Image (cartoon, grey):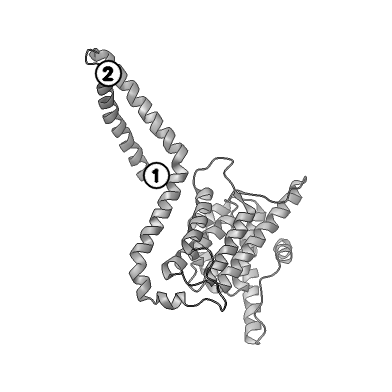
Amino acid sequence: LCEDGRQAVQKGKEYCTRKAPEALRLLLPEEISASVLSSAEDIAVALAIEKACSWLNTNISALIKREVKAAFARMLKIHSQISSSMGCESVKGGCDNGCEHNAPLPSQLITEIKDILSIAVGPRDEEEVVDYMHLKNTLTHLSQTLKCRIYMCYPAEQHLAKCTVELASLLVSDRIPVSGFPSSEHSHEMQTLKRKAFSDLLTLLLSVWKKDFTATIPFYLMFSMKNITYITDIQSHKWELFEFMLRGLIEQRLMDYEDMKHHIHKLEGFMWPAGLLEKLALMSERHRSKQEDGCKEPVCTPVPKAVAAMTSP
């Protein structure tokens, strides 16, 4: 446990030690001998502590989700005046022509994404998984919500941007237990289908970042010690997904190569795929040359070709 967790457990034990004997004295008759009462108190305290720990173990995921939602509610309350001073009304007025304002609310999307993140990083049962179509629908709803600006405010969009970067980091490190992929009898073919499904999700997310967000997206979070640690001790195909994401960020001009190189060099202790920086530099230079020549803005490379390029010698 972390320090806060240890303190919470200690406080819980102290509470049980103090309250269980008090309740026992109220329930038992006064003529009970001191030795029997002492033994009963010890048993009651032990049972109370065991029951409390069992309850926490069963409900910890729900507690984490509730705390996440409460933290976001507090954040919105604190930033309400700030968002107003930053021109929140002008942000809301940016709907496309013909918008019917029936997209999911930003708070609903934040809750859905936070639930997925909680399943990925928090304690969970083995059967607690995220359906692939639910993930895909969530990203589709996110695009709809960002296009309908009537209920959008600056703090909510910032929070959505941060959550989607964390979601992408967990996808490329295979930390999210996803179900609902096409089945196959061969493990290699199954892995290929899963990789393509994840690449489709990342491509959709890249499109949402490119076309729908107006707030600054904190891509640097992908290179945090926590998220890179998730990726280090994994199989090569997951490095391919991470590389695919970096290629997409450059192709969509969402992140500059020099910024990406700076973040990668800050984590020199990790074993990066061979030739990663060289390939990213070549791609960045190619797209920069096309932009200078006035070519049409490129789109993200199709998934099969991108994956094949990453695995080729």
Residue 245 vertical position relative to residue 183 in the rendered view, above or below: below
Asked if residue 277 shows in the view, the reply is no
Q: Residue furthest toward the left?
A: 30
Can you give x and y, in whole percent of width and height, for residue 108 in the image? 49, 59
Instruction: Give the number of the disc on residue 28.
Output: 2
Q: 163 and 103: which one is in front? A: 103
User: At 47% from the left edge and 77% from the top edge, which residue is drawn?
Assistant: 93
Q: 225 and 208: which one is in front? A: 208
Can you give x and y, in whole percent of width and height, for residue 121 in the image? 51, 49
Residue 129 vertical position relative to residue 104 in the rendered view, above or below: above
Left/right of residue 194 with respect to residue 94 in the rendered view:
right
The residue labelled by disc 1 is 2
Q: For the residue marked with disc 2, what is the amino acid? A: Leu
Asked if residue 219 shows in the view, the reply is yes
Q: 42 and 267: which one is in front? A: 42
Q: Residues within 10 Å of mark 1 (few under 14, many from 20)?
A: few
Q: Quadrant of residue 281?
A: bottom right
User: At 32% from the left edge and 33% from the top edge, which residue is drawn?
Assistant: 13
Q: For the residue marked with disc 1, what is the amino acid? A: Cys
Count of numbered tags: 2
Sequence-first disc among 1 and 2: 1
